[in-house]
Image (spheres, rainbow, N blue to C red):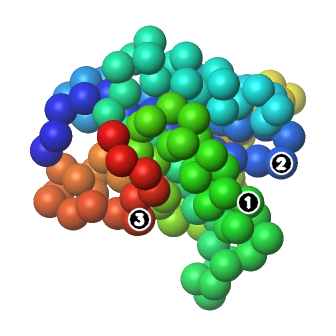
Amino acid sequence: MRTGTRIGVDVGTTRVGVARSDALGLMAVPVVTLPRARAIEELGHLATEYDAIEFVCGLPLSLDGSDTASTLDARQFAIELSAATGVAVRLVDERLTTVAAQHALHDATHSTKSGRAMIDQVAATIVLDSALNAERAGNTLGETVGES
């Protein structure tokens, strides 16, 4: 498994959830939720701060695996993110991660009043964790946009 910090990204229309891994890629932790309008710039700062080797961005496919408007938006975001930062972006299937994040928060707090911002961070953490688990098993999930 490659060493280096990865940054997980859950792209939404108004907010972007962010998570990061440790340098060994053993675990993912929530970091922040960013306003979509500033996300690419802020993710560039985070990539520098954490010396990230790649972004892992959730790809919101429909349940049957086909593209949706959100899928196209995430792909465009990934292209812009890689172009702006010079860091590769790996797009990973994120079907049902927001639902899993909502359930995880509900189970942990018995309330989702902590807000949608935390759900976005947890969703980014779930996407990143699934990519890390696959890589540790010798597989690489998703497709890569850009070069690092």
Q: Is residue 56 toward the left or the right of residue 14 in the image?
A: left
Q: Quadrant of residue 31?
A: top right
Q: Which residue is mark 1?
A: 73
Whether residue 28 is visible, yes or no, is no
Among the two numbered marks 3 and 2 on one chain, the one whose residue lies closer to the N terminus = 2
On residue 13, which mark appears?
2
Q: Which mark is residue 143?
A: 3
The residue under the point 31% across, 46% down is 132
Amino acid marked by disc 3? Glu
Residue pictured at 41% horizontal, 65% vertical: 143
Quarter of the figure with the C terminus: top left
Cα distance in 3D space between marks 3 and 2: 22 Å
User: Which quarter of the picture shows residue 33?
Assistant: top right
10 left or right of 50 in image: right
Of residue 53 and residue 83, the one placed in the foreground of this image is 83
Q: Residue at x 70, y 30 (%)?
A: 39
How far is the residue under mark 1 from the one under mark 2? 9 Å
Badge 1 element: helix
Q: Is residue 130 left or right of residue 121?
A: left
Quadrant into which the N terminus falls: top left
Q: How far across and how far down the image is residue 140, in percent? A: 27, 61
| Residue situated in front as seen by the camera: 3 or 101 | 3
Amino acid carrying label 2: it is Thr
Does the residue at mark 1 contact the one at mark 2 (Cβ under 8 Å)?
Answer: yes
Q: Is residue 34 visible?
A: yes
Q: Residues within 10 Å of mark 3 (few under 14, many from 20)?
A: few
Q: Secondary structure at mark 2?
A: loop
